[in-house]
Amino acid sequence: MSSRLLLLLGAMAVLAVLALLLVVVGKPPREILPSSLSADPGGALGLYRLLEAEGIPVKRWYEEPLHEDPEVGAVLVFEEDDRFSLFAGRLEAVGAGGLRIALRTPSSLPPAQEMETVEVNAHAEAFAGVKVVYKRSAALGQFRSGLLRQGNYAVVDFGLQQGSEPEVVVVDGTMFLNQNLDQADNARLAVALVRSVLPPGKAVAFPEYVYGITGSKTVFQEVGPAYSSFVVQFLLLFFLGVWTLHRRFGYPIAEPMRQPGMADHTRALGYVLRRAKAHDIVLRTAVERTVRREARRLGLPPDISPEDLAKRIEEPLASLLERAARLLEGKPAAAEAEAVARLLREAGARKTRRRMG
């Protein structure tokens, strides 16, 4: 495996671990982003789909409206407690969406010990079916009309925006976030609240631009907030691969050369002889090898001539040796010399197999 491939695999592993850590611990787990596009515990996608399932027209605003929207009868805005009505002027100035529903929320989801299930009293017919809600224990409001009350405190009430425009105030907007919407009668309260203030045929608007979201088709919104960091990591990995494409990290490593063996030398010698058309050398080599082998077998001198040896051995090897000796006396043709040399080698191989078998 090359060092560059190892580097890329190592970088991929490191980036994957970083991406996993970013997903698991990089984002504050209790952060609130009350967008109707967010499925996080602090998002409002559940509220959006609940209203939609109940047949209530819903709409998202990705840009600040410059004129009145005839389709919208109410605007639902989540606002932090310490900056309550911060966006009221922007919505009220153009009269963009009729009645405003203000949901007060903290900057992060409260822990379980700060939440409680309490009984409430409805002082408006629309909330007659709401008996208990799951809310922050510290979220209590001094009521004026007290549409929905917890003892002497308001849970849902009428208020005034900047410019003395009326609005509906929910003192604890965390009731309608994804994490708490299915608790107690919170979902029933959300539907009843919107239906009570929404004119027939009108939609309730979710102003996404208030939370910094200006479009529904961005890459990060398509893949979801929990997986968007993986997109960044893989883009970084891609550019890392391009950057390392023609770069050398360290000195080149010389690959070890394979040492040639006997078979390599034999093939090389055969190639040289064929190129030189030295067919007589090939034939002579085959004859000398046959003479040595047969002389050793019969106990004869190793320098015996092929003619004398042919008189003492059996056929067909004797005839082949005589034929080879005659060819070596002149200039043998290439085809005939190679054929006789091959027959000598095959005859010797057969003898060897018979002795070993």
Image (cartoon, grey):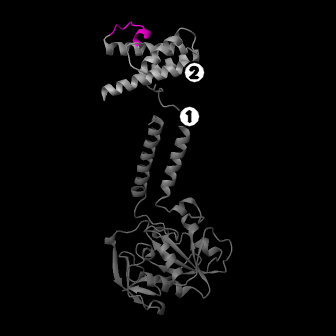
**Residue range highlighted in magenta:** 300-309
In terms of secondary structure, where does tag 1 sit? loop
Work out whether residue 27 can be spotted: yes
Seen in the image, is 315 located left or right of residue 271? left
Q: Which residue in the structure is indicated by mark 2?
A: 335
Residue at screen point 31% across, 11% down: 299
Work out whether residue 259 can be spotted: no
Residue at screen point 32% across, 14% down: 298
Residue 246: give its label. Answer: 1
**Please, is residue 344 above or below residue 26 in the view?**
above
User: Which sits in the foreground, 181 or 147?
Assistant: 181
Percent position (x, y) of residue 201? 62, 86
User: Marks 1 and 2: which is nearer the front?
Assistant: 2
> Furthest-right residue in view?
67
Percent position (x, y) of residue 60? 59, 73
Percent position (x, y) of residue 219? 56, 59
- For residue 20: magenta? no
**Circle 1 crowding by C-alpha within 10 Å: few under 14, some 14–19, many from 20:** few
User: Which of the 4 image quadrants contains residue 107?
Assistant: bottom left
**Please, is residue 80 above or below residue 127 in the view?**
above
In terms of secondary structure, where does tag 2 sit? helix
